Image (cartoon, rainbow, N blue to C red):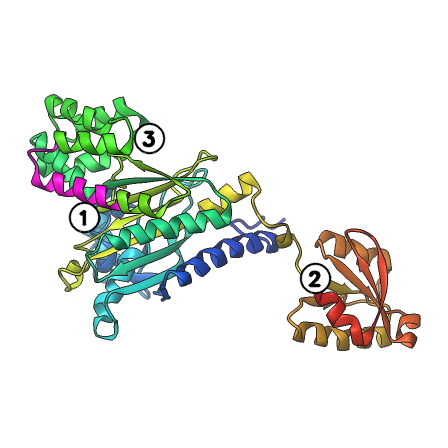
Amino acid sequence: MAQKPSIPKGTRDFSPAEMARRNYIFSTIREVFGLYGFQQIETPAMENLSTLMGKYGDEGDKLLFKILNSGDFLKGVSPEQIAEGASNRLAGALCEKGLRYDLTVPFARFVVMHRAELNMPFKRYQIQPVWRADRPQKGRYREFYQCDADVVGSDSLLCETDLLQLVDDVFARLGIRIVIKLNNRKVLSGIAEVIGAPEKIVDITVAIDKIDKIGLDAVKAELIERGLSAEAVEAVVPIITLSGTNAERLDALETLLASSPTGLEGVRELRFVMDTTAALGLRAVLELDVSLARGLNYYTGTIIEVKAADVAIGSITGGGRYDNLTGVFGAPGLSGVGISFGADRIYDVLNTLDLYPASLSSSVKVMFANLGEQEAMASLRLIKEVRAAGISAELYPEAAKMKKQMSRADALAVPFVAIIGSDELARREVTLKDMTSGTQTAVGFDDFVSTLANA
């Protein structure tokens, strides 16, 4: 017996019903992006590996899917290099391309390549899959979609405020209660400065970003392993475990980081973003979280993370400001800020909470039963008129038993079944059955489209 086929771990197939749900998410996000003035672009699934490497930190680089060179990929690699087993060096020789890890770095590359064609500030959105060689688990996949919105070419913190409003609008439309967590990379740099370890900023951020996953004691142990002194670690703890209201936390940070101009600048930026957002109003809970780092090296200012309030799952949206990202591609000083919606996790949250509209369960509005050749031709003529009016319709392809045809309509949650038998054909009528109530109505051919449109 042939082995049953399978798909790679961390990937998923989606049925028509599941795709209807996913498209509901994409269309909701896409509509809000448009309301906020963002324009759509797309970039290739694969990028040159040189574009991707070094942009996500050491941990991110390890999660890049690398693509073997086409043809004789071992050409130019000596047996000695293979025997050494130095995977990183071999990867550089065997792979010139990789699958994109996120949409932000490809966007930065896009901006640099097309700078002369873009009007600044440039607001783009992008909805495409990304790939990460991560260990698959609940809520974490190797292939998943991101829905990004970015503003590049403006230093204004009002961009952050606008993005927070956008996030709030998207999740309000989806019916998901959320908590938006904010921090600032300058605050994290200030922490590193006041504890006397400015050169350890990356080690500090990578470790403290895990506090929700592994707990405070494990973070302290990791900081020690990364070379911080016990005194420095103890100095970090009261800063990353601040409590109280957002205003109280900001005031405490201002005192704790008083000796760091960089840290104070971060506090000022946080205060501005939180105050302007509060003035506009927000349905979501907005929370200052000093431990939030997101583990990515390219953030330089505001850091944003969104979590579902009613489902235990990881971040469902994240982002921040990345002033220096385009500099590595030859365009220094071009500031950007953006957010990324994790569509696959949002999908899981909506499934858990069953928040989809009831209308998503039906594939077409009306299915015409097939009762014979002449009847089918009459049905097809009406179907053409129905579709021209923007109403979805189909004909059962075979003149099968009515029970079988009705079973299909039930299985697909079709709201209406149209029946044209020999009697209906003679009277130029359709028997329209409401599959929810079970009632049947005789409708003339000439009135059928308008009747169905109002049903």
Numbered badge on residue 233: none
Task: Give the amino acid type for the residue marked by disc 3 in the picture.
Answer: Asp
Magenta stretch encompasses residue 83: no
Instruction: Give the CA separation, mark 1 to mark 3.
Output: 22 Å
* Contact check, label 1 and label 2, Cβ < 8 Å: no
The residue depicted at 21 percent of the width and 67 percent of the height is 112
SS state under label 1:
loop
Q: Is residue 399 left or right of residue 259?
A: right
Q: What is the x, y in percent for residue 113? A: 23, 70
Name the residue rendered at 54%, 39% in the picture. 352
**Circle nearer the N terminus (1, 2):** 1
Report the magenta residues as a range: 257-274
Tell me the SS state at disc 2: loop
The residue under the point 70% across, 55% down is: 412
The one nearer the camera, 248 or 350, is: 248
Left or right of 119 on screen, residue 346: right
Instruction: Say which quadrant the C terminus sits in.
Output: bottom right
Say what amino acid the circle numbered 2 marks. Lys
Q: Nearer the viewer, residue 298 or 144?
A: 298
Q: Is residue 63 above or below residue 120?
A: above
Query: For this view, does 53 lie left or right of residue 179?
Result: left
Mark 3: which secondary structure?
helix
Closer to the camera, 69 or 39?
39
Please state which amino acid type lies under the numbered disc 1: Thr
Residue 226: image x %, image y %?
16, 31
Q: Of circles 1 and 3, which is in front?
A: 1
**Residue where numbered disc 1 is placed:** 300
For residue 334, say whether it is visible.
yes
Of circles 3 and 2, the one toward us is 2
Query: Which residue is under mark 2?
Result: 365
The residues bearing labels 3 and 2 have C-alpha atoms spaced at a distance of 46 Å
